[in-house]
Image (spheres, helix red, strand yellow):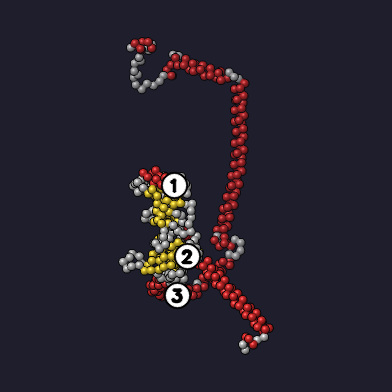
Amino acid sequence: MALQDLTPQLRTRLSRMERAVGWFVVLAVVLLAVGFIYYVYDTAERKGWFKTKAPYFTFTERATGLKVGDPVQLMGFNVGEITRIEGQKPYDQYNVYVEFSIQAPYYGYLWTSGSRVKVNAAGLLDQRVLEVTKGTSGYPTYIFYPLREVSMAEARGLAASPAWKLGQEVADATLTNLLARALTPLTNLAAIAASGCTNLVVVDTSQERKFMTGIWNDKQGAYEPYVRGRTPYWLVSDESPPVTERLEELVGQIELALPNILGLTNQLARILSNSTELTSNLNVVALTARPAVSNLAAATAELNRPGALGEWLLPTNLNRQLETTLGSANATLATANTNLAVLAENLNRSLENLADITSNLNNQVAANTNLVRAVSDTIIHADQFIQGLKHHWLLRSAFKNEKTGPSPPASPLLSPKQSGQE
């Protein structure tokens, strides 16, 4: 049926339906486009397509377990991915070139000192993963500030602004002492000029860019302008062998140890057989020792009462003699104790009498103050009396001394004055 054959009412309804279908198709297309755009944005956000990425490279012994697109880890986080894996030339000292990128802001953890690449095993098979370590000192591997090279005269003009800093290390003329470090203010320009330096690399820290402007050159000790496509910064790698190689080494060690293990099992078998023979011999020894054990049980049964051990060690007659001896000793000790008590009492009485005598003598001396002088005079008079008896003609012979030999002639007594004159 042609459209002209329809009634006006049908044609009106058909045009309305066509408009509704058209709006539905347009809405579906818009929703599909919005969904696709959101998917692309989410994927780009998740994979860091909108983030700044700093390139790095390292060398490994082998590419086993590594492939382009594998994540790169830092402190347990996925911070980048491997972008390129190539083998080196046959005469090169390194084997495999591995390039990877670190996305913002994690490249700020990588410094010129302390940052390395660890190639670790990541599974039971040959899979491995790259892990970068946090830097400890040195300088950032990349900078995001404007970088330029100026003369010493221009540097003196820039020294007034604290935003301008050195972009290199400056050593003295002998190249042994460091005059200035990178990323420090322009304050030591006189010493730098004296070292023979004519141009300086400076950095304007007041303007930060979104992309890398400089890369550190370890050989030159300075930042160089960075452009896309140039050689990235080199991080030294610490590579561990894959798990399969370690398993092969472990299997080799087990194969080497198997003969020893078999020998050990043979020794264990011999030990078990010897133990069996020993237990059989112990059974025979136990049967032989049964009478001795029964006798020992009977002897110990006799000891199950108070004093049984003493009666067993000491016979009856010896025990009786010991009791008699101890009784006699006890009596003797009692008698000696009594005599000692009497002796002590007599000694105490004698000491008391002696104390009385000394006290009386003390009292006499205290009462007669001239007693000592009188005794002394009496002794002197008695001596004079004896001397007089010696000179008496009747008693002189009784006091003569026996002479053993001729005595030397007595020298005449002289006065001190005469002895001095002689």
Q: Is residue 181 above or below residue 78?
A: above
Identify the disc placed on residue 272: 3
Secondary structure of the residue carrying numbered label 1: helix
Secondary structure of the residue carrying numbered label 3: helix
Q: Is residue 130 above or below residue 399?
A: below
Looking at the rendering, in which quadrant would you find the N terminus?
A: bottom right
Cα gap from disc 3 to disc 1, whole angstroms:
91 Å
296 or 401, nearer to the observer: 296
Q: Earlier in the sequence, mark 3 or mark 1?
A: 1
Q: Identify residue for label 1.
A: 158
Query: Which residue shows up at 58% across the image and 52% down it?
Result: 326
Amino acid identity at mark 3: Leu
278 or 330, nearer to the observer: 278
Residue 360 location, quadrant = top right
Q: Is residue 346 left or right of residue 418?
A: right
Residue lying farthest left?
A: 91
Residue lying farthest right?
A: 9
Looking at the rendering, in which quadrant would you find the C terminus?
A: top left
Image x and y of residue 398, in percent: 43, 19
Q: Disc 3 vs disc 1: which is toward the camera? A: 1
Query: Which residue shows up at 42% across the image and 45% down it?
Result: 156
Label 1, residues with CA under 10 Å away: few <14, some 14-19, many ≥20: some
Cα gap from disc 2 to disc 3, whole angstroms:
62 Å
Q: Is residue 195 above or below residue 51?
A: above
Tell whether label 2 touches label 1 (CB within 8 Å): no
Q: Earlier in the sequence, mark 2 or mark 3?
A: 2
Identify the disc placed on residue 80: 2
Cα gap from disc 1 to disc 2, whole angstroms:
38 Å
Q: Earlier in the sequence, mark 1 or mark 2?
A: 2
Image x and y of residue 410, in percent: 35, 15
Amino acid identity at mark 1: Leu
Residue 141 location, quadrant = bottom left
